Amino acid sequence: MKSVYYAIEVSRDEHYKTPYLMGLKEDWPSLAKDFRHYCHLHNPSLGETWVWTAPNGQKYVHFIIDDDQKKMTNEERMHSFKMCLRSLLKSEDLKSAEKVVLPKGGFKFNDQDLDKIKTLITDVYASNGVRIDVEAGL
């Protein structure tokens, strides 16, 4: 059975402080703990993805886009986003995905970036068959 994956933007030293991430942390306290543990063990690079499965089977894809240690330009963040899309495309997890949703509040991009994001998604996933839904107001 194919699953719906929810993608969220995180940094390597994420503290789940944005309203959307705080809500996830409240619903699934082990999400933040497991992500910190993963980062401690694997020291992921910008542009990598990590999938976490909730006890109810819901999947959350962490797009490691941001680096809290330095101020990133919009172009650097877009580049990391594209690398995450490619990383997810290579992932075994994507084989069980019906669609990937980029939820409103799950990313720190503004509305002006929405067209660029949709173009990147089309470029990377043009022939893959997995639907990517972008909710307005990322």
Image (cartoon, rainbow, N blue to C red):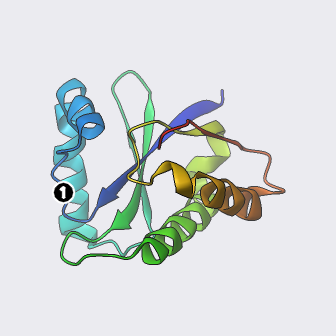
Query: Farthest residue in the right direction?
Result: 127
Point 44% across, 67% down: residue: 48
Residue position marked by numbered label 1 in the rendering: 37
Q: Element under label 1?
A: helix
State whether residue 4 is above or below residue 94. above
State whether residue 71 is above or below residue 14. below
Q: In this view, does 68 lie to the left or right of 5?
A: left
Query: Which residue type does callout 1 highlight?
Result: His
Q: In this view, does 68 lie to the left or right of 62?
A: left
Name the foreground residue: 85 vs 41: 85
Where residue 91 sits, quadrant-wise, is bottom right
Q: Where is residue 75 in the image (x, y as percent from the top left)?
A: 49, 76
State the quadrant of the N terminus: top right
Query: Farthest residue in the front direction?
Result: 112
Where residue 124 sits, quadrant-wise, is bottom right
Point 27% across, 71% down: residue: 67
Name the foreground residue: 135 vs 6: 135
- How would you rate the neighbour count of disc 1 (Cα within 10 Å): few for under 14, some for 14-19, many for 20 or more? few
Q: Position of residue 69 (x, y in %)?
A: 18, 76
Q: Is residue 96 left or right of residue 131?
A: left
Q: Where is residue 88 in the image (x, y as percent from the top left)?
A: 57, 58
State whether residue 80 is above or below residue 96. below
Total count of labels = 1
Point 44% across, 28% down: residue: 58
Point 19% across, 37% down: residue: 30
Q: Where is residue 2 in the image (x, y as percent from the top left)?
A: 65, 31
Name the foreground residue: 64 vs 136: 136
Query: Farthest residue in the top direction?
Result: 56
